[in-house]
Image (cartoon, helix red, strand yellow):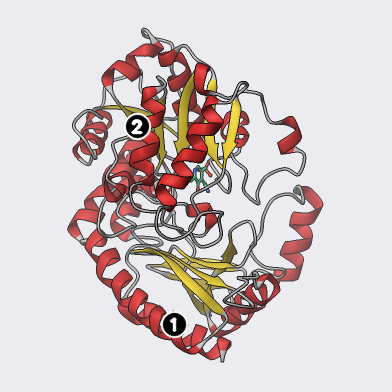
Amino acid sequence: DPAVELARRGAVMAAAQEKYYERPPQIERGWRELLIDTRGRSYVDMVNNVAVIGHSHPRFGRAVSAQLALLNTNSRFLYSALADLCERIVATSPDPSLDTVLLVNSGSEAVDLALRLARIHTGRNNVVALREGYHGWTMASDAVSTSAFDNPHAAASRPGWVHIVDAPNVYRGRHRGAGAAEAYAADLARLMDEAAGPGADLAAFISEPVLGNAGGVMPPAGYLALVYEQIRARGGLCIADEVQVGYGRLGSHFWGSAQQGVVPDILTVAKAMGNGYPLGAVLTRRDVAESLAGEGNFFSSAGGSPVGCVAGLAVLDVIRDESLQQNADSVGRHLSGRLAELTERHPLIGTVHGLGLYQGVELVRDRDTREPATSETAAICERMLELGVIVQPASERQNVLKIKPPLCLSRESADFFVDCLDEVLS
Ligand code: PMP
């Protein structure tokens, strides 16, 4: 009984822990892009960006179970899956300069390690991050996050080394239309060079290549390249948080950095990498990685374990053998086309952000004022659940239906989602 489960959670878990619905379905099984509840009802899952190869993939399950039955230990011993996985990650690299991997267990840890690496490598302290970003829940990754997940007291307690600048949100931000990339980059340059600004003691800039937590907003063309130039001119490193957007989700490119035409100094990945098995990584340059200086200065008990590595390899095998990046591209294009057609008929849709299987349907009460349709978005999600689709509000305003399903999403499921949305909006 879902009500009993909710009560049990409430009794032993913190209220801060997010659940998707007031009365979430009790899910028992997953299959491809479907979640199936205890009553045998199936839902098209448009939100699970971790299960990239699909829920309960048999090849993944078999590989992980076999390794679990054989051995799981830490990276202090030799087993070939570890070097195999690191080689395979390096082979996906957006640039040959990024040739060294450190393995961890989650996105938060990857971001934490990236920030630590940048500060050690540069010998400096300050980090610039974008408003509306989310990078994790550990002390350092939380410090550079400002999204709706944020603790209300976080802004006041934000450490002095963190400097937040406006995200280049061309739909809602201060600069829109032509020249927006330059204008946002100029704002950032101004912030860095203020008297108490981060420019003089700059360690790093961190952002997602696509503004995921803003709802999948694409930065204006050229923005990231300009920012990376400015950061490097002041001696800082550029960190691309690819935890959400990377790993083929954008369809056109494996990494968001490549899609944006930039080469970061440090790249973070997790979520998709283990398809639900906790696994994350930092991909960086050899000289940056070497600033940890010597054996023993970095160790993660389970990061890079045999089971984690086998899980990571199985995910990459399936992405390749089932052409999932290509599927994200073709089903993503189909989805974009159908959503564009919906936008013409339903004034509640302000715009559709993103590409591939990473899109955001931004809902507004008025297309001119762009007043966020927050309560409507929540109501739509509840109604979509009744129809058999799991989709959730995103962004600080909670008015974007963020589409980030498993990359095996079929064209039929994409159509089902759009048809249900059409019905609910009507
Ligand atoms: N970075 C980004 C961009 C994320 O979206 C998330 C998770 N939502 C994280 C980091 C943190 O990852 P994890 O939850 O695996 O710690």
Closer to the chain start, of discs 2 and 1, is 2
Inter-mark Cα distance, 2 to 1: 40 Å
Which residue is disc 1 drawn over?
418
The quarter of the rendered structure image containing the N terminus is: bottom right
Is residue 178 found left or right of 381 in the rendered image? left
Label 1: element kind? helix
Q: Amino acid at mark 1?
A: Val
Which one is in front in this view, the residue at disc 2 or the one at disc 1?
2
Image coordinates for residue 166, horizontal then vertical, percent: 56, 45
Q: Specify the label residue 21 is tagged with.
A: none
Image quadrant in which you'd find residue 86: top left
- Give the residue number, with chain letter if any, for mark 2: 229
Task: Tell me which residue sits at (40%, 69%) in the image.
Answer: 33
Q: Which residue is drawn at the image coordinates 43% and 20% (left, top)?
A: 117
Foreground pick, 379 / 72: 379
Please state the horizontal and vertical placement of residue 226, each as a whole percent of the image. 36, 39
Q: Quadrant of residue 419?
A: bottom left
Q: Please, is residue 83 above or below residue 380 in the view?
A: above
